[in-house]
Image: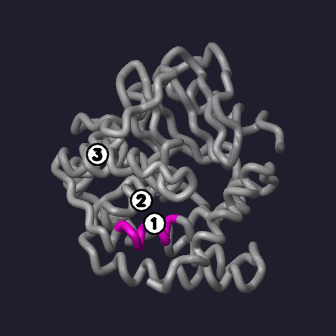
Amino acid sequence: MPSTDLPIRAATETAIAHGIVPDRCDVLQNGSTLVLRLTETLVARVVQDTSGPRQGTEWFARENAIARHLTENGAPVIPLHPDLPPGPHEHLGYPMNFWEFVTRIDAEPEAGEIGRTLRQCHEIMSRFPDPLPHLAIITESLQILQDRELFPQTVQQMLTDRLTASMAVLSQHPQQALHGDAHMGNLMNTTRGLLWTDWEDTFAGPVEWDVASVIWNTQILEEDHATVEAVCEAYRAAGGSIDAGALECSLIGRAAVMTAWYPILYPNPNAERQARLQRRIEWLREQAAI
């Protein structure tokens, strides 16, 4: 793992430049993104993988814009920190943004609350005024597969075919601003309630993409269909609509996206991650052509 000294310095110097003197440096996450708690209330997210598929700060700017919109309209999200300009910031070559610290609680989130809060975010995002790239995570994943040989050729081609077909089908459904990566790891149960975070993948697409993202592991890997139904039913009860065809296509597209990104996100996967990757590939092979 590369040294975190320089990205930590970039975050602390940026905070100081805006009048905030860090009194701690607690590493909350150390991966392609470094997450640091610098004060009682301030958290920095610093992109460490500066040679990855995403370059510059344009994608961070979209994240900040959607996060501000959600916060200002009372959505259940972790807010950007109010004492710094929203940015995105860049220092010493590291893009970063700054968020409020929230206290996580141990209780597992209720399925109904997951569906309800996702629908609440979608309703607010439907009024987001700025244009967002269309199905960006799919186009990014296709570009990754074109630029890099990550898998045996048969798998590489299968992923390309699944992504291309998913884009063709999902383009025919209503589009709006989405989270883009709405899995359970981007949902925190906190003393403030259930809050969504990590909006860097935001793009325009059908709402079924986010629903598929939050239920994929539960439905496919865990086969916990009762929880899946509870999430979807709560989403509908809160005023949302889920098209069965778009959801099925989104499940396939989501699996292909996660597979394409896996070698980048987890270059040295442990046995459990390797097994999950293989299960996704096998599941995708089992799916009939879209």
Measuring from the top left, give residue 178's x and y in whole percent: 35, 57
Please say whether residue 69 is visible from this viewpoint: no
Q: Is residue 46 left or right of residue 137?
A: right
From the image, give the main secondary structure of the stretch colored magenta. helix
How far is mark 1 from mark 3, CA to CA? 20 Å
In the image, the segment drawn in magenta is: 247-254
Callout 3 amino acid: Cys
Q: Amino acid at mark 2?
A: Ala
Of the residues shown, which amino acid type is indicated by label 1?
Leu
Which residue position is annotated with label 3?
121
* Disc 2 secondary structure class: helix
Q: Secondary structure at mark 3?
A: helix
As rendered, which of 227 and 192 lies closer to the eye? 227
From the viewer's side, name the closer residue of 16 and 70. 70
Instruction: Pick the residue in front: 252 or 180.
Output: 252
Marks 1 and 3, the one that precedes in the sequence: 3
The percent position of residue 50, horizontal first and vertical second, equals 69, 55
Spatial CA span between label 2 and label 3: 15 Å
Q: Which callout, 2 or 3, points at the residue further toward the start of the chain?
A: 3
Q: Is residue 261 magenta?
A: no
Q: Which residue is mark 2?
A: 212
Disc ID at residue 251: 1
Q: Residue at x 80, y 49 (%)?
A: 270
| Residue under the image location 22 percent in, 38 percent down | 73
